[in-house]
Each structure stands twice: as structure tokens, then as C-alpha cells.
Image (tube, rainbow, N blue to C red):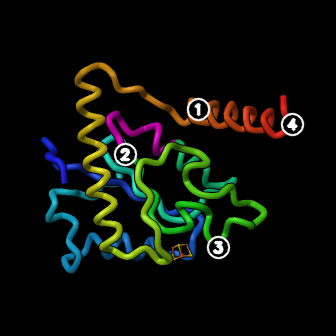
Amino acid sequence: MGFSSKSPWLIHYDGSSCNGCDIEVLDSLTPLYDIERFGIINTGNPKHADIFLVTGSVNYQNMNVVRHIYDQMLEPKVVVACGVCACTGGVFRDCYNVLGGVDKVIPVDVYAPGCAVRPETIIDAVLQGVEVLDKKAELMRAGKLETVTSEDYAARLAASSGEAEKKEVGA
Ligand code: SF4
């Protein structure tokens, strides 16, 4: 684990899921798994949070909630997709209203697989997220951190899917 000059605060949102991973996130906060021993604190306020934990897939109804939480967080920030549904859409990926994993709407820094994701995996992923956070903080101090809003991200995805389509038709 990298050195962090502050205790990272995390915020959690559960998207379209069976709630299994949501419960595992709560488990990681209990005294048994005790993510707080790493100085990590849970908050309900995106403006106070450094790490965004998302469980469940993204659908047309919750996509703007995910974007809104992400955009309210201040830089530097890190997103962790927890569980297969958050990573790829999982068992919900073929549902009529599901877009897929979290990276369909916001950039993801760390993927924590599992169905359900284990609390140990969540803790490992959050600690990886702390390292990413430290690197981003360094870039920010040097004035080199690129800020990506959910709108920028959507534009990039649209541009890259346009490029992919062009390649497919040989343009
Ligand atoms: S990854 Fe599995 S346990 Fe987690 S929300 Fe999806 S279906 Fe439920």
C-alpha cells in the first residue's frame, strides 16, 4: 500500500444488483473485516469522498445517479467497481434496461471481481485505489492531472465507438 498523506474517505452506491455485493461492502466496514484499520472512513457525502465504490450494474434509470455522484467528487478521486455486475453487467448484462458495468458511464480505476465479491477482495481493491489516489494527488500537485467529467467520458466513449465502427466497415 502506498503512503497516503490523509485518511481516504469512501462513498458507496449500489446500482442494479441482487444486493449480494452491497452486503459484502457493508461487511468490509464491520469490525470483523475492518477496512477502517487502514484509515479508510465511510461517508455519505460525495464532496467528502476520495474513493467511489460501486456495486451492481448500470441501467438507464441509475446511470445519472452514478454520474452525478462521480461529478460531485473533487479531484483527485478513484472509482472501484465491486463485483462482476459492476465490472461487466454480470448476470444482468442482457436485461433490456441494463447498459453494463460502471465503465459504461464513468471511468473505473480498479476492478474487483467476484459474485459476490469477497470483503477481502474489496479491501485489496480499495488499497489499490489508495495507490492510484496517491499517484493522482502527485500529478495534481504537479499541475498534470487531467480532470475527466462524466460528460467528457461519454464523449470519449462515443468517439471511440465511432472509430471502432469505422474500422469494422473498413473506412
Ligand atoms: S456480482 Fe453477484 S452478488 Fe454481486 S450484485 Fe451481481 S449477482 Fe449479486
At a point 20% along the width and 71% down the height, the residue shown is: 34
Counting residues from the N terminus, which is met first, the one under dot 3 or under dot 1? 3
Say which element carries label 1.
helix
Q: CA distance from mark 4 to mark 3?
A: 31 Å
Residue that carries the numbered disc 3 in the rendered image? 91
Residue at position x 33%, y 74% from top? 119
* Residue at figure coordinates x 32%, y 36% from the top left: 76
Q: Secondary structure at mark 2?
A: strand
Which residue is the site of mark 4?
A: 169
Q: CA distance from mark 4 to mark 1?
A: 27 Å
4 or 3: mark nearer the eye: 4
Nearest to the observer: residue 72 or residue 52: 52
Mark 2 nearby-residue class (10 Å; few <14, some 14–19, many ≥20) = many
Question: Which one is earlier in the sequence, the residue at label 2 or at label 1?
Answer: 2
**Residue type highlighted by circle 4:** Val
Q: Looking at this view, is 26 or 35 the one in front? A: 35
| Dot placed on the residue nearer the N-terminal end, 4 or 2 | 2
The single residue placed furthest to the top in the displayed view is: 143
The span picked out in magenta is: 68-77
For label 1, the crowd category at 10 Å Cα-Cα, with few meaning under 14, some 14 to 19 and many 20 or more, is few
